[in-house]
Amino acid sequence: MKKRIASLLLIAALCLSLCVFPALADDAPAPVQVNVSVSIDGALVLTNANVLVYDADEDGALTLNDAFICVHDQHYDGGADAGYKAVESDWGLSMAKLWGVENGGSYGYYVNDAMAFGLSDPVNENDYIAVWSYVDTEGFSDQYCFFETREIRSASKDVDVTLMGVGFDEDWNPVAVPVAGAAILVNGEPADAVTDENGKATVHFADSGEYELSAVSDEAVLVPPYGKVIVTAVPDDAEEPTLIAPAPTLESIAVNVSIACGGELVLPHAEVMVNDVDDDGALTINDAMICAHNRYFEGGAEAGYSVVESDYGLSVAKLWGVENGGSYGYYVNDAMAWGLSDPIQAKDCIVAWVYVDTENWSDQYTFFEAHKISTTDMDVTVTLLGIGFDEDWNTVTVPVAGAMVTVNGMPNVEGLLTDEEGKVTLRFSGAGVFELSATSENAILVPPYGKIGVNSFADTTKHWAEEEIETVISAGLMGDAGKGSFAPNDNLTRGQLVTVLYRMAEFPEAEGEMPFTDVKDTAFYADAVLWANANGIVNGRSANKFAPNDKVTRQELVTMLYRYAKFQGWDVSVGENTNILSYNDVFSVKEWAMSAMQWACGAGLVQGNKGDLDPNGNATRAQFAAILARLLG
């Protein structure tokens, strides 16, 4: 068995050695896996191909442009150099060649069956991307369509499928509509099945196996959809063949939600844990809205949020307690959402609002080009963009001029408005974390949300814990680790830990004689050690050794914080009912640290990493800052 495992590992290593991946910058975003389908002149030339996407254009983000470069490099003969090209245009980066075809810019692309605004749109793990060259290069009438369920597993040889397409309502909002009269293709061949007025068709499969679906129509030019059917073996005399629906375990995901009412942000960029509260088997915008109201709206979703079934599917009927006849909007990652049933993913940014202009719906969706900026500069330039429409009613990104960018709810200090490019330079007088939004006297804006972190130290800029670090610096709890740096990734020491707790306690008088021979009276942590030891918050390593320079494990850290909380008389009862058995390494937690770890998890101070608590791992200064910020929160 050991020889077999060793052989498999050797084979894997050899396979990896044959794969050539570009050298990524240290701060480059981590690559993601996506699936891509490419259609040229109405025919699928690449179906649901797995693509590893990295920051190929080196712009610091994973975007559609990166996905298209990577799909050509990995699947097109000659790579992206031969098959793909993008150029700068009046509307930003535009496609100029796809799969070797140059047709004057007539290309389209959707992500997860939602219209993309441009090549700079972000991509995420497991996204499905469809890209095509238009057949109708003059009227752009090619209709994007998709199977309502992209993959079906069935124990029956007769399988029902539904073909949907993207249309527009009377106000030119995109809506999903059934595609009637389309012929279903199975592995590229007609299947003797045509969709009805509801977009439905029954496809017969002679044998078990995996089949690829698509569709064509004599009545319209379709962007060919992709689907898959897996038919499992079933006896011919089976009485009642049934669909086998895989039962995925839907884990909760964290997203950020902003809600605006009356032209003002009532919930700015709040973190929301989303689960399948509507029990429809998917994590959707509707789930996010329910969970956001349950957590942040007084009275929960029952009081503040409701939906109704309409001709266009599920629609909002009440948002943040406001009922206004259905005038609501919502975007995901600055892209227009089709409906409440749209899927969401971890780290999505969802914006929902109540229209101010309930007759013409003229409220303009706006967003900062960079949602979050980290810098040590005191002068920071931001760009405000909005969603507009070109002459063909395609959505485009446009600069928003003449808007007042607000900082923490107040007009910026200089009183400057955005220029014709949507830019304005903000001046800050010191370090801190600042929240941005914008208003305008020229238009009704859906208020955007942005954040600027003016950092005290260069080595915390773009660090995962930069906001938490700045919070504890502003509170006077942590600071310079030496040589003008914070050293966020350095291990936390026992001396540093007790010093922070001493500062939190507002420097109480330390009485008595120092019992530890390794703590000098002149050490910066001397009074803190004497106080913490006297009050049972931090013990020595022995009767006369404190070991101030020793590293602190994660379970030691939460134990000391737990003792500090009890010393201050804080309520720590949340730990009594907190079950941490779901963590993979829970039995690595020492008995003396178990109550503290339960409290820390129950209070949201410790969140684990990929199902692990890592109790014996050394805590870093950044991790300590993050826990402190949550504790202060």
Image (tube, rainbow, N blue to C red):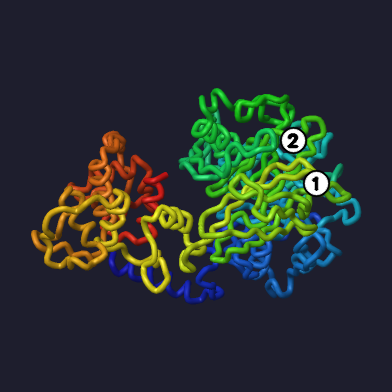
The residue sitting at 42% across, 57% down in the picture is 473
How far across and down, in percent of the image, does residue 532 sit?
A: 20, 52
Residue 557 vertical position relative to residue 245 in the rendered view, above or below: below
Residue closest to the eye, 565 or 178: 565
Residue 199, numbered circle? 2
Task: Choose top left, top right, bottom left or bottom right for residue 414.
Answer: bottom right
Per the image, label 1 sits on a secondary structure element best described as: strand
Give the labeled residue for mark 1: 143
Amino acid identity at mark 2: Gly
User: Which image quarter holds the C terminus?
Assistant: top left
How far across and down, in percent of the image, does residue 93 sit?
A: 75, 63
- Mark 2, Cα crowd under 10 Å, few <14 / some 14-19 / many 20+, is many
Task: Choose top left, top right, bottom left or bottom right for residue 177.
Answer: top right
User: Which image quarter holds the N terminus?
Assistant: bottom left
Residue 227, visible in the rendered structure: no
Inter-mark Cα distance, 1 to 2: 14 Å
